[in-house]
Image (spheres, rainbow, N blue to C red):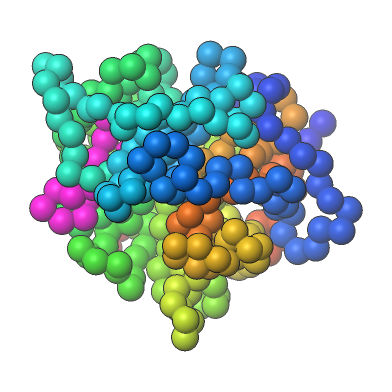
Amino acid sequence: MSNVQIIGPAVPNMPWQERPETLNGAPVWRYSENPVIGRNPTKEVARIFNSAVIPYEGAFIGVFRAEQTNGIPYIYLGRSQDAVHWEFEEEKIQFTDAAGNPAMPVYAYDPRLVKIEDTYYMMWCQDFYGASIGMAKTTDFQTFVRLDNPFLPFNRNAVLFPRKINGNFVMLSRPSDSGHTPFGDIFISESPDLVYWGKHRHVMGKSPEWWEMVKIGGGAAPVETSEGWLLFYHGVTGTCNGYVYSIGGAILDIDEPSIVKYRCENFLLTPQEWYEERGFVPNVTFPCATIHDSATGRIAIYYGAADTYVGLAFTTAEDVVGYIKGHSVTRESDTEIGIR
């Protein structure tokens, strides 16, 4: 049995591919049939990427960033029996307010999806008189009720933890500006009711490591393990040809997740394959979701590739936690509780 345990349900039908014998570096390997979602996946949609999936009723369901042919991003619903081959609804998700009235955002992109108790919560980036975070909830993936925007502009990359901590909902976010911000640290906030947010804490910032020197931001919902919260996040560096987005890994304290226990100095995945290097925005690997099985410790990571495709990668809790711990470099701003 693995020394690192995933805390959560078993997902025996999750997608999986064994580790290649030739793998070097970080223990994260790409699905050999990537990308799992290509261009023009459905009517009026040119590209799907930066999307989130979750087990649902013995199969899988997802919320997908769909760039429409008119260039405006919205969120579409998709379903799959194997979490690899997807069927998408032709119409974007129709959000309502609590009274059932239409309540569509101006645009919506980069969704995350988390189940807490018996409710599924979706977070995304949107316009709230500037770049900001939108939220909605559903119990049946038929009705999607929007919640109040949790924060003022400007903010992005929000993701809820998959359970309450010390009785509160807990969310990661990345304060920014209204443009393609050249800065950004990960912060954490708490709420008793998803309306009033406070107890804001700094989690971690960019580092001197080359692959995350410009900014960082949250990725997939944290995975609860016996070592702490396993966080796959994105790190950004600048080159003479633009930004490069890589996937990093950290482990947060289970009860005080503003404290970083371990932070990998190396990237876990960086653009290398054609579908990551070549696309609408080249050189992007952007994590948004995981499916993980507590029985085997297997983890499937879903990531956006080049703002054009969806890629799939694999690891195990034992391998990736061991690698993060073995290559960890933390600094004072990581290990302090995050109040100044």
The reply, left or right, for residue 335 in relation to residue 133 is right
Vertical arrangement, residue 114 with respect to residue 336, above or below? above
Left or right, residue 18 beside residue 76: right
Q: Which is more toward the observer, 285 or 233?
A: 285
Residue 132 painted magenta: yes
Residue in the image at 45% along x and 73% along y? 243
In the foreground, 192 or 95: 95
**Residue 193 position within the rendered picture, expressed as x and y whole percent measured from the top left:** 23, 27
What is the magenta range?
123-136
Residue 270, how many percent across, how many down? 61, 64
- The answer to whether residue 46 is above or below residue 270 is above
Question: As displayed, is residue 236 above or below residue 210?
Answer: above
Residue under the image location 51 percent in, 19 percent down: 56
Residue 15 found in image quarter: top right
Query: Per the image, is 105 magenta?
Result: no
When the figure is inspected, residue 322 is found, relative to residue 242, above or below; the finding is above
* Res 299 seen here: yes
Residue placed most toward the observer, 121 or 279: 279
Q: Which residue lies furthest to the front in this view?
A: 43
Q: Position of residue 20 (x, y in %)?
A: 84, 51
Residue 287: x %, y % from top left? 51, 50
Residue drawn at 41 percent across, 57 percent down: 217
Which quadrant would the C terminus be assigned to in this image? bottom left
Q: Main secondary structure of the magenta part?
A: strand
Quarter that holds the N terminus: top right
